[in-house]
Image (cartoon, rainbow, N blue to C red):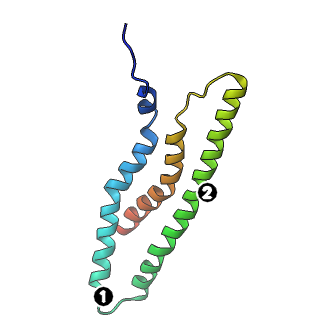
Amino acid sequence: MSRRHPLSKVFLDAPRSAAEMSTLMTMSPIVIGSRMMQFWMSAAAPTAGDRNEASRMISEKMQAAGESLLAMNLAAMEAATAATLGAVTGRGSHSNHGDAIMYAGLKPYSQRVRANRKRLSK
């Protein structure tokens, strides 16, 4: 008889946040490198487009942080509701709430990184 590790279900249900982290790890250096090269090449005489890119770089991070915070709070509330209902009804929850919360928090950042990589690679 084989015994399963108690966390094996957790590890099997984790690919959503792992995929978002992989996206961030692989595409962020490309975006950062593209932007740094653009800023370096235009340092002596920045154009309006260069200024817009610098402004966009900051504003999109603030927007992503707000979206991430809201998404993580909603996911945490869903997890708390599911856990409460599971306790009341006697049916345990079989989902990985930690992964769902982490995925919700990472998704706004990875969406922006994907869009920036696509836009800056043209």
Q: Quadrant of residue 77?
A: top right
Q: Quadrant of residue 95?
A: top right
Is 74 on the left or on the right of 24, as rendered?
A: right
Position above or below: 72 against 29: above
| Residue drawn at x 61%, y 57% as measured from the top left | 70
Of the two numbered discs 1 and 2 in the rendering, the one whose residue sits closer to the viewer? 2
Position above or below: 121 against 94: below
Residue designated by label 2: 70
Residue 122 appears in view: no
Residue designated by label 1: 43
| Residue drawn at x 40%, y 18% as measured from the top left | 4
Is 58 on the left or on the right of 63, as rendered?
A: left
User: Do tag 1 and tag 2 residues touch (Cβ < 8 Å)?
Assistant: no
Secondary element under disc 1, as helix, strand or loop, is loop
Position above or below: 101 against 63: above
Q: CA distance from mark 1 to mark 2?
A: 36 Å
Figure quadrant of the N terminus: top left
Figure quadrant of the C terminus: bottom left
x and y percentages locating residue 18 in the rendered image = 40, 43
